[in-house]
Image (cartoon, coloured by chain):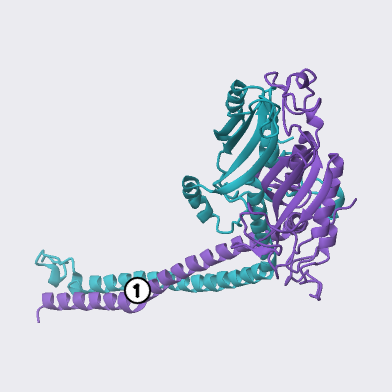
């Protein structure tokens, strides 16, 4: 073996030693470190997600008082049970304010009812149950249409999807205005015409030129207004607040121990939304 | 004097090998040593990364578990908020898609000519039209939490009017004026009959035509897309006496009913 051969052999051996060291020692550790880096990224992503969930939950916790108050107030529009007495009370109050006689209320659906439900509340496909009613009011045209405005104004949608609740949510499906039987000739509605006045306006000159059968002041003619409307009720078993209390929702550490009243549909918060005279 | 050669005998040939006496083996050894040092450095760095990243994984995982546990403790609040949002959306949807009867009657009284009088009004909301229902299907599908309204989107409100006028031309004027009602899509005359002689027709005075007209309105609107804003949580109540004490954060709102200028 020549000197050159020995050098080549030594070089090959040296390279083999270095390659072995790389493959057996360094490379596995580097692969392990890379794999751990992936695990670190995954864990950090998981942590980020958990922190986001926690932030949202803390936000919901911070908004709980407002949400609880709002959901209780929404219960005034859509109560947990039928709450017919409060509905009658609200209608009577608003009719008194409008100088309208609240003549009758019946729970039977009329032919024009699109719900097709009977006297009992019928569960809709999406949760709320529909309760069809028929109301009969007596009053002038102006008072009756203002009454309609107030009835629909019990619950109205405001900007940005907010809801203003001051009474029961009612969807009016039909309105019949007619002269009461035996009332003689008269007018349901008339106006002063091209003067641009609405029904609010007094039309002194208009009444003299109206149809001769009209009364001298037809705006004050008493009409029979039959309103077909639908009220809504939360589905059975779904309480107004779902067992929540002002301290916290059901199942939270802040919530009191659930008693019989906590899960009942007519929970204590329902009393909060009763209309006070 | 004899000259003495001071050059070592192995170097006297004049060709000194740079490999030295080892003939380059020393360089190989040095190279191996240098390579081993680099390998050792890389190995150390990798080991350090492994240990630090292992510790980091453990730490981050534990932290995530703690965070998730804290979030789970607050899950009832999340669920309650979701229930509230769903209910608010449903009520808002029902309230926002109603027909504004008061506004329609206000308009009816506004446009009616002075020489025409209405003896009866039968207002109804019919079934949803095909075109409107198809246009609303997307919105209805998107709002999976929507509730079924008694007056569904696409339903067509209509008034059946009957009344008297002083002449047939006044009936025509009435038809023309009824088209001015806000939201009216069609006005169709059913009949206009003038009584003969002294007999009256439809409760109208003699020689006064009694007419029957159907006024159709535009279909009810589809519910708008739910607002992602939490501002909708500001549910307000006009009855202060009915609001609990904790609702003082709700802003006041004075929008008219159904947003169409109802009085």
Residue B82 position, x and y percent, is 65, 61
Residue pushed farthest right? A277
- Which quadrant of the rendered structure holds the C terminus of chain B? top right
Q: Is residue B250 left or right of residue A112?
A: right
Vertical arrangement, residue A67 with respect to residue B175, above or below: below
Question: Which residue corresponds to mark 1?
Answer: A27
Q: Quadrant of residue B28?
A: bottom left
Residue pushed farthest front? B197
Q: Colour of chain A?
A: purple
Q: Of B15 and B53, which appears nearest the observer?
A: B53
Q: In the rendered structure, the residue with mark 1 lies on which chain?
A: A
Vertical arrangement, residue B6 with respect to residue A66, above or below: below
Vertical arrangement, residue B151 with respect to residue A24, above or below: above
Q: Colour of chain B?
A: cyan
Residue A57 position, x and y percent, is 66, 62
Residue B256 position, x and y percent, is 72, 38
- Which quadrant of the rendered structure holds the N terminus of chain B? bottom left
Q: Of B160 and B202, which appears nearest the observer?
A: B202
Q: Is residue A63 left or right of residue A21?
A: right
Q: Of B174 and B87, which appears nearest the observer?
A: B174
Q: Residue at x 65, y 35 (%)?
A: B162
Find numbered disc 1 in the image and state the secondary structure of the residue it sits on. helix
Q: Residue at x 57, y 71 (%)?
A: B59
Residue pushed farthest bottom? A1
Q: Quadrant of residue B188?
A: top right
Q: Is residue A19 left or right of residue B234?
A: left
Residue A118 position, x and y percent, is 68, 62
Vertical arrangement, residue B15 with respect to residue B118, above or below: below
């Amino acid at each position: 073996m020549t000197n050159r051969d020995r050098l080549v052999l030594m070089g090959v051996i040296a390279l083999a030693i270095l390659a072995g060291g790389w493959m057996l020692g360094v490379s596995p550790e580097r692969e392990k470190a890379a794999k751990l880096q992936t695990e670190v990224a995954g864990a950090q992503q998981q942590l980020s997600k958990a922190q986001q969930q926690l932030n949202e939950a803390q936000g919901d916790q911070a908004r709980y008082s407002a949400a609880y108050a709002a959901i209780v107030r929404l219960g005034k529009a859509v109560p947990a049970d039928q709450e017919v007495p409060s509905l009658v009370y609200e209608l009577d109050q608003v009719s008194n304010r409008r100088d309208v006689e609240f003549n009758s209320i019946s729970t039977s659906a009329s032919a024009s009812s699109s719900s097709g439900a009977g006297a009992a509340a019928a569960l809709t496909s999406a949760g709320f149950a529909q309760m069809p009613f028929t109301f009969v009011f007596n009053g002038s045209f102006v008072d009756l249409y203002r009454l309609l405005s107030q009835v629909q104004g019990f619950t109205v949608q405001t900007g940005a999807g907010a809801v203003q609740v001051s009474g029961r949510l009612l969807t009016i499906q039909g309105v019949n205005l007619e002269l009461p039987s035996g009332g003689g000739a008269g007018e349901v509605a008339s106006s002063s015409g091209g003067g641009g006045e609405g029904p609010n306006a007094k039309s002194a000159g208009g009444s003299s030129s109206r149809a001769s059968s009209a009364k001298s002041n037809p705006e004050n003619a008493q009409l029979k207004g039959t309103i077909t409307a639908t009220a809504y009720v939360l589905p059975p078993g779904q309480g107004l607040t779902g067992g929540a209390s002002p301290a916290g929702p059901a199942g939270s550490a802040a919530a009191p121990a659930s008693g019989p009243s906590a899960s009942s549909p007519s929970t204590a918060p329902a009393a909060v939304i009763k209309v006070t005279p | 004097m004899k000259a003495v050669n001071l050059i070592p005998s192995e170097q006297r040939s004049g060709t000194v090998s740079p490999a030295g006496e080892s003939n380059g083996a020393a360089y190989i050894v040095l190279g191996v040593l240098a390579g081993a040092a680099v390998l050792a450095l890389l190995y150390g760095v990798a080991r350090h990364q492994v240990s630090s990243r292992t510790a980091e994984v453990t730490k981050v995982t534990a932290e995530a578990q703690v965070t998730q546990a804290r979030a789970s403790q607050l899950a009832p609040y999340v669920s309650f908020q979701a229930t509230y949002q769903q209910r608010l959306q449903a009520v808002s949807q029902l309230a926002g898609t109603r027909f504004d009867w008061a506004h329609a009657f206000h308009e009816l009284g506004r446009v009616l000519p002075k020489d025409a009088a209405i003896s009866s009004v039968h207002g109804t909301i019919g079934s949803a039209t095909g075109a409107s229902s198809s246009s609303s299907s997307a919105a209805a599908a998107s709002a999976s939490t929507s509730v079924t309204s008694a007056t569904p989107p696409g339903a067509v409100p209509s008034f059946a009017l009957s009344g008297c006028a002083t002449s047939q031309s006044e009936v025509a004027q009435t038809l023309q004026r009824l088209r001015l009602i806000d939201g009216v899509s069609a006005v169709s005359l059913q009949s206009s009959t003038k009584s003969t002689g002294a007999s009256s027709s439809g409760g109208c005075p003699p020689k006064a035509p009694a007419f029957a007209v159907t006024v159709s309105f535009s279909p009810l609107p589809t519910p708008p897309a739910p607002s992602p804003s939490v501002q909708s949580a500001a549910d307000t109540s006009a009855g202060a006496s009915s609001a609990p004490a904790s609702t003082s954060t709700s802003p006041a709102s004075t929008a008219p009913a159904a947003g169409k200028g109802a009085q």
